[in-house]
Amino acid sequence: MESEMATAKELKELSADDLKQRAAELRETLFQDQLKRRTGSLDNPAERTQHRRDLARVLTVLTQKTKA
């Protein structure tokens, strides 16, 4: 997965299947972040916040696409 998340404008250009795949990847990343946090090996807690926001952005665009 890329290090910097795409903007909402860039996400709108992706297909619904691509967005679903990206959402699944972000959910897995969040799960890994949660495990790292509980074991005390999470280096940068701000990354977890960024991943949550990225997932919300992807899900928002996906919802807009499915309702349009």
Image (tube, helix red, strand yellow):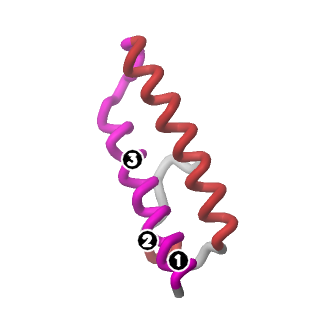
Q: Residue furthest bottom?
A: 68
Q: Secondary structure at mark 1?
A: helix
In this rendered view, identify the residue nearer to me: 22 or 46.
Answer: 22
User: Quick one: label 3 or label 1, which is nearer the N terminus?
Assistant: 1
Instruction: From the viewer's perspective, tell me whether residue 11 is left or right of residue 24.
Output: left
Question: What span is colored magenta in the figure?
Answer: 40-67
Give how far apart the Cα atoms at labels 3 and 1 are.
18 Å
**Does residue 1 show up magenta in the picture?**
no
Tell me where residue 29 appears, x and y as whole percent: 53, 37
Question: Mark 1 belongs to which amino acid?
Answer: Lys
Helix, strand or loop: magenta stretch: helix
Tell me where residue 43 appears, x and y as whole percent: 37, 23
Q: In this figure, which residue is indicated by the disc labeled 3?
A: 52
Task: Give me the disc on residue 12.
Answer: 1
Q: In this figure, which residue is indicated by the disc labeled 2?
A: 8
Picture residue at 65% right of the left edge, 56% below the top: 21
Q: Residue furthest front?
A: 67
Instruction: From the viewer's perspective, tell me whether residue 22 is left or right of residue 45.
Output: right
In this rendered view, identify the residue nearer to me: 22 or 62.
Answer: 62
33 shown above or below 12? above
Question: Mark 3 belongs to which amino acid?
Answer: Arg
**Does residue 62 show up magenta in the picture?**
yes
